[in-house]
Image (cartoon, rainbow, N blue to C red):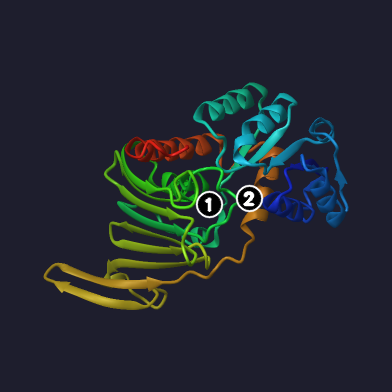
Amino acid sequence: MSRLNIGVVGVGHLGALHAKMLVNIDSAKLVGVYDSNHERALKIAEEFQLKAYHSYEELLRETDAVTIAVNTKAHYEVAIQALQAGKHIFIEKPITETIKQAEELINLSKQKKLKIQVGHIERFNPALLAVEHIKLAPLFIESHRLAQFNPRGSDVAVVHDLMIHDIDIILSLVKSPVEQVFANGVAVITDTIDIANARIQFANGCIANVTASRISKSKMRKMRLFQKDAYISLDFNEGNAEIFRLVDASEVGQSVPDVLGMFNLETLNKKIVYEKPKKNEINALKHELELFIDAIVNHKTPQVTAEDGLRALEVAQMIVDKISSQQPFYKI
């Protein structure tokens, strides 16, 4: 089977990880890297025995696809050039800086019949993969994504930097239009929002309470899902999931996990069962890159489409707009 010629654009911290993963994917041939900082490109190229291209145009001429890991403000410019050259693109989140830019990328990719996959890596976190066997229909969601301050990513609000991970996951689970957003946020270290909380109300009645901070002492990435007869806890840091379900007592057998309690209320005869699915030992970044390549080679729809990226960006922007309308001094 022929291998897909692919290149990496932007080899900072994340782009270097792209290169590290791609050299170990059999279905891809990483032909080289490009970075506006050529010394950095040379360093990464030497590490993985690749070519460091002097120009982006040269890299595009020798590839079928590129992964884009430049800073958010440069996403559109780099991505549009690749699409115009007829190349498929994997682009890190958020898809672009503005909604209009994302719409333009989508329109051009459709015209040229090219694939766009957005790097919402948490879709492939072992914690989320562990509950694929459960029918998820949450009515209330609570998420916390807290991190210590890191200048990388601080060129955008924490909503676009961190919270957008959870926004994307929530939108993929709820699959209902957003009706209303309430939000608050504070700029503590940077000129943009460093800590934010949003309450997202969906047309189907689901409510999501989402918190993100980049000024936390300790790291936390947790999400809790509440739905009819079930509570699911996801720890994205550890890659673990816990499931608590209410089932008919008659269903409890040897194959059912731990029983935590029992209800005997006249006609109600229920038991609470607990399950901790086995952790799927998977490298989320490598997995999403493999899926991107598979989508191109086998003419599939990418797992996280540009439309998914746009929807997450739209909700993130609603949150930022709500906060900035209350605190207009933010430099969004």
- Residue 184: x and y in percent read 34, 46
Location of the N terminus by quadrant is top right
Instruction: Tell me the kind of residue under disc 2.
Output: Glu
- Residue 123: mark in rendering: 1
**Label 1 Cα neighbours within 10 Å, binned few <14 / some 14-19 / many ≥20:** some
Q: Do the residues labelled 1 and 2 touch (CB within 8 Å)?
A: yes
Q: Which of marks 1 and 2 is nearer the N terminus?
A: 1
Q: Residue at coordinates 36% horizontally, 41% vertically from top-left?
A: 323
Judged left or right of residue 101, residue 133 is left
Residue 114, image quadrant = top right
Dot 1 lies on which element?
Answer: helix
Relative vertical location of residue 55 with respect to residue 85 in this rendering, above or below: below
Dot 2 lies on which element?
Answer: helix
- Residue 148: x and y in percent read 52, 61
Would you name the residue on which mark 2 appears? Answer: 288
Residue 258 appearing in the image: yes
Q: Which of 48 and 25 is in front in this view?
A: 48
**Label 2 Cα neighbours within 10 Å, binned few <14 / some 14-19 / many ≥20:** many
Q: Residue at coordinates 79% horizontally, 49% vertically from top-left?
A: 40
